[in-house]
Amino acid sequence: MSDAQANSTANSPAASLLGEDFNWADAIGGWRGLAESVAPGAIFVAAFLMWGGFRIPVIAAVATVVVMVAVRLIERTPVTQALGGLFGVLLGAVWAWRAGNVNEYFVPGFWYTGIYAAAMVISMAVRWPAVGIAVGFLKGWGSRWRTSPRAMRRFQGATAFYIGTQAVKLAIQLPLYFAGATAALGTAKLALGVPWFAVALFVMWRLVRNVELPEEPEGRPQPTE
């Protein structure tokens, strides 16, 4: 792993689950990451309020994220987060354009949230909770954490909490979508995006920060389950 990759991993949102102190800047992907996450949606809502329709808001959101990716390429800085935003915005734009309805811009996000939450439910059901997998990877535990009842309880609880945060997002946004409240839906999407994720990450950090495993005896094979 290169130094840049190591730094990227250390400063990733998932890494906020580790350590004695919670780093809010890491949780939101840094202040630039926050701006890049918020800007396309904010531009979309502003353009809708000013011009209405679906073409100008969709074009404005796509143009915003394309500019952000281009700036990162020019600066030769990592484009992973910006490219993720580009994919999401483009998918929403195609969806809205094909339907000719500005509200359809948000539909891919609903599907993503629902599928993501369902995958985490499955991870709990098979006793491989997603939070445990993330912490085990970041701490180099492999699958050893699965042999600890305390660790399993904490990771199951943290995963269940995160599923709950996704259910809250859908419970707030879907009624606005069906009511055709585009501006309110766009605003809710912004509030329930990175800021909501950071709050969720803080609670999960509180749940798992004290989880520790005994040292592995030297020469003992690691579980391969």
Image (spheres, grey):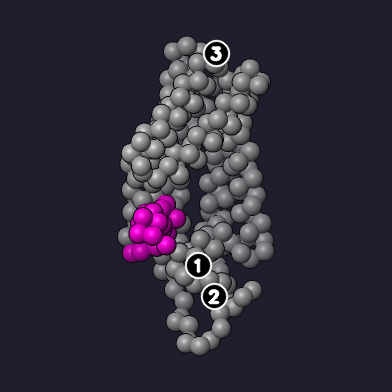
Kindly identify the residue that appears in the image at 47 percent across and 87 percent down: 218
Kindly identify the residue that appears in the image at 40 percent across and 45 percent down: 78
**What residue does disc 3 label?**
53
**Disc 3 to disc 1: CB gap under 8 Å:** no
**What residue does disc 2 label?**
144
**Disc 2 to disc 1: CB gap under 8 Å:** yes
Picture quadrant where residue 157 is located: bottom right
Cα–Cα span, label 2 and label 1: 8 Å
Q: Which of marks 3 and 1 is nearer the N terminus?
A: 3
Give the structural element (helix, strand or loop) at label 3. Answer: loop
Cα–Cα span, label 3 and label 2: 54 Å
Quadrant of the snapshot with the C terminus? bottom right
Cα–Cα span, label 3 and label 1: 47 Å
Picture quadrant where residue 21 is located: bottom left
Q: Position of residue 210 (x, y in %)?
A: 41, 69
* Left or right of 133, for residue 191: left
- Stretch in magenta: 1-20
Task: Name the magenta segment's main secondary structure.
Answer: helix
Kindly identify the residue that appears in the image at 33 percent across and 64 percent down: 20
* Left or right of 134, for residue 7: left
